[in-house]
Amino acid sequence: MSKKKIVILGGGFSGVYTALGLEKHFKPQEASITLVNSENYFVYKPLLPEVISGAVGLTDVVSPIRRLCPRTNLVLRDVENVDLEKQVVTCSRGFKARHLEIEYDYLVLALGAKTLFSIIPGLVEHGLPFGNLADAVALRNRVIRCLAEAEIETDPEAKKKLLTFVIAGGGFSGVEVAALVNDFTRDALKNYSNMSPQAIRVVLVQSGKRILPEVEEGLAVFAQDLLRKRGMEIILGDRLAAASSEKAIFKSGMEIPTRCVVSTVPSTVPDVLEKLDCEKERGRPLTTPHLELSGQEGKVWALGDCAWITLPNGDRVPPTAQHATREGACVADNIAAHAKGGTPRVFDFGGLGKMGSLGHHSAVAEVMGVKLSGFIAWVLWRFVYLSKFPGWDRRVRIGASWFMELLFPPDMVQLSLRSQLGVNEQHLEPGEDVFEEGDLGDSVYIIKDGTCEVTRGKGDSKEVLATLGAGQVFGEMALLADAGRNATVTAAERTNLLVITKPVFDALSSNVPEFGKIFSKVASQRTEENAEG
C-alpha cells in the first residue's frame, strides 16, 4: 500500500477523535495524518460555560492537540479553500504572506459551525457569541466590567442597564450560560458595597414554547421553574430582532436596555464550506450513511456540526459531543477500510442521553430513558463530563477546581486580552524586506521615516524600480487588485512604517470614499509609469 496523505480540517471533537482513530489504524509508514486548525489546542466545550464563573481554570478546559495526537502533523492555519477536483486544501498565510497548499488522498471536513450574527442588525457590533474559549473569556470580562461600572454609576437608569444581561437562545448552551451568569453575578456582589442581588436582571429569551427543546417536557418545565426561582426572567415565544450599544430589541417590539447581549443561535457553516461545490441540505454538506461527502465517496468525509448527517431511520444526528466523538471513530474506521480493502460501516449511533447544568448544584438529565433532575442529575453531569475529558492531568485539575469552588468565593480577575489593531506600526533595519515578490497583498504601507527600495527579480536580473521616502505609500496595487505582490520592497535604512491591514482598508474605502480614491489614484499613476518604463 502506498503511503496515503490524510488531511483533517478542524480540531474539535470530531476532528481530534478522527485523528486518534487514524493513529490506531495506520502505521507511520502507511499514512501521513495532517490536522489543520487555527489553534493548537482542543476545547472541551461542554465545560466552557464554567469558565465564565471561574469554576474551572482558563486552561483546564483545553488540551494540547500535539499531546492528544502525537503522530498527527498539526498545521496552525485557517482553511481558505478546498479544491475537490485537484484534491488540494489552501490555508491562510503565516508570518510570510503566502498561502499554504496541502494535497490529500483522503480529506475529512470537521470545521464545526459559526454563530450567524449578520442576519440580526447590530449583533455583529454589539453582540457576544459563545462558541469557543475566546468567547467565554470575552463574556466573563464583559460581566465583570459591567459590575465594576455599575458600582460607581450614580444614574439609576444607567446602573440598571449595566446590571441587565440578555441571553438569546434557550437550548442547552443558552440555558447553561444564563444560569452561570446569574449565579456568578449574584455571588460576585459580595465584593461590592453599592449593589444588591435584587438589582441583577438576567433575561433568557427563547423562540419556542419552552426552553431546552432537546429534553422531555417535564424536565424542561422543572428547569424553567428552578431558574425563575433563582431570579432569572424567561421570555418564551419571542426572539432577538436587533441589538445596539444600549438595548436588545425583540421581534414582538419589546426593548430591554442592556450593555450585554449574548447570542447562542442561530449557527451556520464556515465560509469555506459555504462556497464548496457539493450537495447540501440547509446549507450543510450532505453525507452518505458512511459519512462520506455525497458525490465524493471514498475521498472526502464530513462530520460534526458542519455536516448534515442522518441515521438509517431518517432522524438527523444532533450536533453534540457524544455524537461527534463516535462520528470521528466511524470516519477513521471507514478511511482505513477504504485504504486497506475492508468493509465500511454505517453510522447508526442514536445517543445515550442528554444533560445540562442549571447552576448551583442542579441539572437536568435524560440518560437511556431515565429522567433525572436536581442534585442527583448535577452529580451525574459532573461525573460523566469529568470521565470523558481526554487526559488524566486535565481531569485532576478540573476536579481540584470544582473542589476549590466549594470552599472559596468566585474569582473576580478580569483578563485584559487585547486584540491586534487593524492599524499597526512596523520597524525595519537596513536590508530587511517589508514583503517579497509573490506575497499576498494583505496590507498597504505608509513610510513614517526612512527609505525603502522597490525591486523586481533576483540575483543578476534584479532591477531597481523606485526608491520611496517619508510620506509615500506603497502596497496598494496588489491590495486593490486582490493579487500577489509584483515587486519586493526592502528597507534601505532604518525605517518605520504605518501598516493598514486589508479589513481596515476596505472598511475605510467603503465608508470614506475619498480615502479609497487617494490610493486608487496612486495605483493608476504607478501603472502608467510602469507602462511608460
Image (tube, helix red, strand yellow):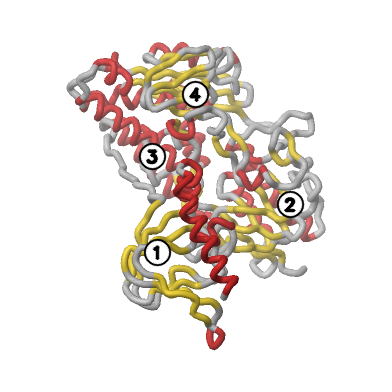
Residue on which disc 3 sits: 137
User: Is residue 53 shown above or below 364?
Assistant: below
Q: Please state which amino acid type lies under the numbered disc 2.
A: Val
Q: Dot 3, crowdedness within 10 Å: few (<14), some or many (≥20)?
A: many
C-alpha span from label 1 to label 2? 49 Å
**What residue is disc 2 on?**
300
User: N-terminal of the two: label 1 or label 3?
Assistant: 3
| Name of the residue lying farthest toward the left | 193
Report helix, strand or loop for mark 3. Answer: helix
**In the drawing, what numbered circle is on residue 472?**
1
Query: Taking the image as drawn, is residue 461 in sight?
Result: yes
Callout 1 secondary element: loop
Q: Could you tell me which residue is drawn at 39 percent across and 27 percent down?
A: 245
Residue 242's label in the rendered image is: 4
Would you call the spot at circle 2 few (<14 residues within 10 Å), some (14-19), or many (20 or more)? many
Closer to the camera, 397 or 507? 507
- Mark 4 and mark 3 lie on one chain; the one further toward the N terminus is 3
Pick the residue in front: 524 or 141.
Answer: 524
Could you tell me which quadrant the N terminus lies in?
A: bottom right
For marks 4 and 2 on the same chain, the one whose residue lies earlier in the sequence: 4
Q: Say which label, 2 or 3, has the lower sequence index.
A: 3
Contact between labelled residues 3 and 2, with CB atoms less than 8 Å apart: no
Q: Position of residue 347 (x, y in %)?
A: 74, 40
Pointer 4 with pointer 1, Cβ within 8 A: no
